[in-house]
Image: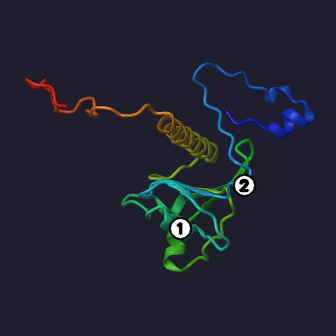
Amino acid sequence: IPVDFQRLLKQGDLSQNVYLEADDFVYMPAATSRDVYVMGAVYQPRAVAYSPGLTLAGAIANAGGKIQYAYLSHVAIVRGSLADPKIAIVDFNEILKGEATDIPLDPRDIVYVPLKPYRILSRYADLIMTTFVSSVAINEGARAAVKNAPPTTGILIPFGSTISVTPSATPVR
């Protein structure tokens, strides 16, 4: 749920005062964060470090490039806040062929490469925002879990693997 803290804190808009529940995750991006987020049908969906001159092609290349069935004629660039995003749909095929100019990106843009076309822009926007927020929450949760993880002892056996453990006759010291 995006919250507009400017409206909450400066204008007193209580509609932005969201009550939290157990296990809720709150993400507040650093004000200095300048990354561009590349998601969807790319090999390594991730945050790409922004530098002046970064373009759509450069960001997708930094994420490992497109996967085989990426639908390149409907690549989305999302700019602005999560509460009021502006979305541009770009035909990336035209850029690859040199028929259109590559698009310069801004810090904190979100690039989404779909696997299929979307006909209703509002549903496409919801999909992009949900994917973005979910991936950030998962990544931040994983970082927090690893940072606070207890010292590891023993071995990790993935659930559902075919590995079985049989106690040895003498303990290993």
Name the residue rendered at 36%, 34% in the picture.
152
Which quadrant of the figure has residue 89? bottom right
The quadrant the N terminus occupies is: top right
**Label 1–label 2 contact, CB within 8 A:** no
Above or below, 160 against 120 in this view is above
Please name the amino acid that badge 2 sits on.
Thr
For label 2, the residue is 32
Above or below, 21 against 157 in this view is above
List x then y, in percent, for residue 151.
40, 33
For label 1, the residue is 92
Name the residue rendered at 63%, 64% in the picture.
50
Q: Return the disc, 1 or 2, that comes first in the chain's sequence.
A: 2
Crowding at label 2, few (<14), some or many (≥20) Cα neighbours within 10 Å? Answer: few
In depth, the one of 99 and 113 nearer the eye is 113
Asked if residue 113 can be seen in this view, the reply is: no
Q: Regarding mark 2 in the picture, which secondary structure is present there?
A: loop
